[in-house]
Amino acid sequence: MTAVDRIVMCVFDGLRPDMITPTLTPNLMRLAARATWFREARSVFPSMTRVATSSISTGAMPSTHGIVGNAFYFPQAIPEHVLDVSVIADVKRAEAATGSRFLTATTFADQLAKAGKRVAVVHTGSIGSTYLINPRAKANRHWTFSIFGGEATETPEAVTEVIAKFGPLPKRELPRFQETDYAARVMTEFVLPDAANDVAIVWFNEPDTSYHYKMLGAPETLKVLAHVDAAFGRILDWVERQPNADRIAVIAASDHGQISSNELIPLPELLTRAGHPTQHAKARDLAGAAIAYTGGNMGEIRILDGGTARRDAIARWLAEQPYVGALFSPGRNDVEGQAPGSLSHAVVGLDHARQPDLVYVLRSSDDPDPYGLPGLCRISGGGIPVGGGMHGGLNRHELNATLMLSAPGVETARIDARPTGIIDIAPTILALLGVPAAAGMTGANLLGPALEMTTRTHTAGAGSFTHAVTVHRGGDRLILDQGRHSSNSPRGI
């Protein structure tokens, strides 16, 4: 494989690949015509942005990088409340407690820095995901701009430089039209013209934000999707104008997909009524709680009082509820979890030292939402209105991520249906620039020899409750396919 001169990567937060069409996204389709489209690419579990960002940057599962949720209880750093990875004060406390190793894996940016190469990031997503794409940006002498301002980046001088050239940061409005346009302009007029940037990344917070609040297939959301595609088109235009365009690799990706929510389950209240005083992560205070809980269409449960007896009692109670689709806990072995009816965290790559006592996933299906898109789920809070998009679980439509690659030697207009994932992005970036992968990277170079993968389905349950997860494994590489529960059709999850 011939090394490239540079790499341009555009991440569309939450973009479902089945919403990429000639009508909605002509510029992404323009890239697809000159790229290989890894149509069955998968996110990781939990399929949440901060977790997925860490897997993109490290080429590894949460079992390696240690970011086990968008929010998770981490008493080593913050004993009094659940750590929220989108809150800069929480991240700083975690960094202090871990000796600047909150992310417990080497990133592609770390590897590039060792090789004397430079990464520039333009980020419109949360503070946490801005940090996790290159957490050691300052030490690496790289450049990260955040739409949230100087406090939200390791390199605040990047924000100062951008404001001096392009004016004040845009207002926070929904949909994020202004932020999208501002970021695209910073890319095309500032970052890309600087030849010192070997890797230039833009992370668009759309369509994820509008999926959440404006519904996946709603007319307003489709306008957002068209808008962010047009912004990408301007970046693609810049690349195509360059004299060395054939030596510039372009990656289009998303961190996860989304599905629509259709029912709210008041899980904290139900758990409390069942004898397990529950405090939601958003409360920022665990006083008097027996368990700490995070919500969405999945979440973690941490036992604060009652030990394994309470954990197992909660697992049995959850297994009896008609809205629960899957349970995971620390492993009895590589497949079985310690809690009744659960699979091991190792099955889904969540077996880190920071792993939760229990993880639940609420039931979902392949049924169509009001706009005809497959995928419906229950939610247990998290601030998203019923009907809004959600992600985090194991439905194949929320796991299915966008991943396209255009580079020298890459077959054009090709659909690749092999098991691939966002963990493959980091080793591919490094290989394209002739830099070796880090030891902890379990993803594969997408341009390397095809890896032999074995497909397995792991099943667990208690009483009438059963659930299963299908995965692809090859050596240390783990690609999730989907999860299913007892009432699903074979296609469901």
Image (cartoon, grey):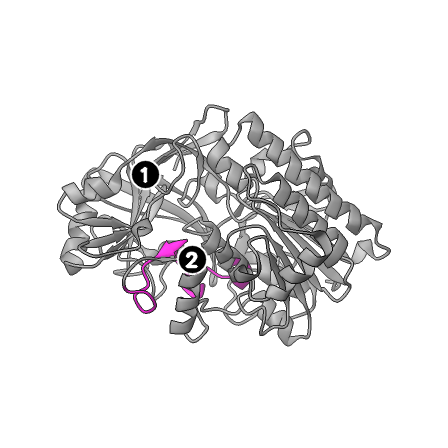
- Residue 333 marker: none
Residue 74 among those drawn in magenta = yes
**Is 408 left or right of 64, judged from the image as shown?**
right
**Which residue is found at the position 40% from the left and 38% from the top?**
384
Q: Which residue is mark 1?
A: 485
Q: Which residue is mark 2?
A: 85
For the residue pair 346 and 391, the one nearer the viewer reads as 391
Q: Give the image location of residue 413, x and y in percent.
A: 72, 42
* Magenta extent: 55-79
Q: Say what amino acid the circle numbered 2 marks.
A: Val
Instruction: Give neighbour class at mark 1: few <14, some 14-19, many 20+ (Cα, 10 Å).
Output: many
Q: Position of residue 66 (x, y in %)?
A: 41, 64
| Residue 283 vertical placement versus 433 (above, below) | above
**Looking at the image, residue 455 lies above or below residue 435:** above
Q: Nearer the viewer, mark 1 or mark 2?
A: 2
On the question of residue 105 being in view, the answer is yes
Q: Quadrant of residue 76?
A: bottom left
